[in-house]
Image: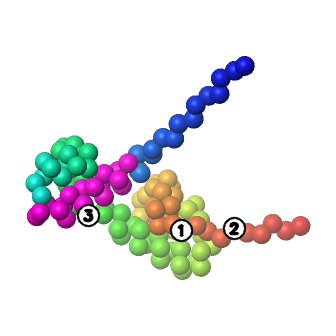
Amino acid sequence: MGRKPRTRLKRTPIEGGKRERRKTEIVQELMTEFSLDLLLKAIKLARWTYYYHLKQLDKTDKDQELKAEIQSIFIEHKGNYGYRRIYLELRNRGYLVNHKRVQGLMKVLNLQAKMRQKRK
């Protein structure tokens, strides 16, 4: 009789970052009522993690202009363009950007091209 292998769910780095960011926001809200040490201990967040995410909250989104351009191209072509065509359209408009970056931003923006029906 063989042993059943254990399956373990792993957190993706993105999910972990979101969780820590949310904890940082909560600490920011409660700073007026409680001490920083008490809050960090209560939510089990390291001090350096708190300050790291606090600094990240202040950063501006460097992809904001590119996201707006991707959305406008997607809407302009009525959702028929996927990341490959949007990448080519961005190149035509003078943006030097990698196709993987376009694909990732489209995933963040939740933009997905319509699938063509196969003909029989």
For the rendered model, the colour scheme is rainbow
Q: Is residue 29 visible?
A: yes
> Within the magenta stretch, is there residue 30?
yes
Measuring from the top left, give residue 49's x and y in whole percent.
23, 46
Which residue is tagged 3? 60
Q: Secondary structure at mark 2?
A: loop
User: Residue type at mark 2?
Assistant: Met
Q: Quadrant of residue 112?
A: bottom right
Which residue is tagged 1? 111
Q: Within 10 Å of the Cα at label 1, are there few (<14), some (14-19), or many (20+) other Cα atoms?
A: some
Identify the residue shown where x is 69% and y is 67%.
115
> Within the magenta stretch, is there residue 25?
yes
Decide which of tag 1 and tag 3 comes sooner along the chain.
3
Q: Quadrant of residue 93?
A: bottom left
User: Residue type at mark 3?
Assistant: Thr
Quarter the N terminus occupies: top right
Pointers 1 and 2 in contact (C-beta within 8 Å):
no
Q: CA distance from mark 3 to mark 2?
A: 34 Å
Which residue is tagged 2? 115
Give the magenta part as a residue range: 16-33
Pointers 3 and 2 in contact (C-beta within 8 Å):
no
Q: Within 10 Å of the Cα at label 2, are there few (<14), some (14-19), or many (20+) other Cα atoms?
A: few
Q: Quadrant of residue 27?
A: bottom left
Measuring from the top left, give residue 118's x and y in whole percent.
81, 66
Identify the residue shown where x is 47% and y is 67%.
109
Q: Is the stretch drawn in magenta largely helix, strand or loop?
A: helix
Identify the residue shown where x is 15% and y is 50%.
38
